[in-house]
Image: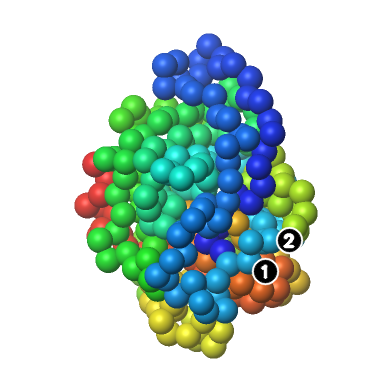
Amino acid sequence: MKLFILTIFAVAVASAVENYDGPEYQPIDWSRVVPVHELPGFWEGTVYEKLAMKPNPRASRIVGGDEVVPHSHPYQAYLLLQLLLGTSACGGSVISETVVLTAAHCLTNVRTVTMVAGGHNILEVEASQQRRTVEAVNLRIHPEYSRINVLNDIGTILLQTALTFNQFVQPSTLEPASTNTFVGFTSQATGWGRVADGGATSAVLRGVDNTILANSVCAEVYGNVAINNATICIDTTGGRGVCNGDSGGPLTVIDGQRIQVGIASFVHSSGCQSGIPHVFERVAAHLTWLNNNMS
């Protein structure tokens, strides 16, 4: 995996509505959206090139979940990624009027990003949506991100035009620096995607609830190379979890309030419904870096 869109959408997007970000709005040509991990050379030189963890091209995205109440996750963002060799997509989360949080691997070799905030049905031009187009110069990847081992998988997108916070677009509340591992907490991951491996994609935002596991349990599968204090894993028993296209999206828990504890990173090659833990980058491990990359 790394979580990316697996299906070519043949959907025409309607023309922009009057309050739809004016000159920054550009219609999305869904017919050009292809799986980024199927682009030539994407996995070359990484542990995923030959090892069992290499993503399954048949895998999908949010699996075993349900459609969320529209706009109940106003921090959720959709990222359309323009690469030299094609177009793909990831998830993300709004963390300020001008910053969107995502996975580092989502921003690697990207030329431009079209960010959509405030969306529910991503195939439609909804009046609630705010879109921004961002050039590569405004993308920030953690300097210690390891493409080989997928460590420090975190990045930010700096918007040149600020978002307008309203009932549809709000910032995610990030996990504060603490020693809480949230093991045993019920988490929720959100994204746009299929309802099952190889099934139909969903145009609307979906969510799935999973229990957070101890890293020691996760390391039994992936080893200590990929699992450390900066990762967080979820139990996917019953075939429930994230998958292709959800990379970079938020993992949240309720701890007094809803807080974001993770960023979707990778799953096992045996499929998103295999029951093998899914892995996220831990937000609290990178707060200093984030504070230095908000402008």
Residue at the spot x=53%, y=45% of the render? 89
Counting labels gives 2
- Amino acid bearing label 2: Asp
Q: How far apart are the two marked residues, 2 and 1, measured between alpha carbons?
A: 7 Å
**Residue 225: % across, % down:** 41, 82
Residue at the spot x=25%, y=49% of the render? 293
Q: Nearer the viewer, residue 169 or 13?
A: 13
Looking at the image, tell me whether mark 2 or mark 1 is earlier in sequence order.
Answer: 2
Mark 1: give few (<14), some (14-19) or many (20+) Cα within 10 Å. many
Residue at the spot x=35%, y=29% of the render? 162
- Whether 39 is drawn above or below 279: the answer is above
Residue lying furthest top: 18
Mark 2: give few (<14), some (14-19) or many (20+) Cα within 10 Å. many
Q: Identify residue for label 1.
A: 271
Would you say residue 259 is visible in this rendering?
Answer: no
- Amino acid bearing label 1: Gly
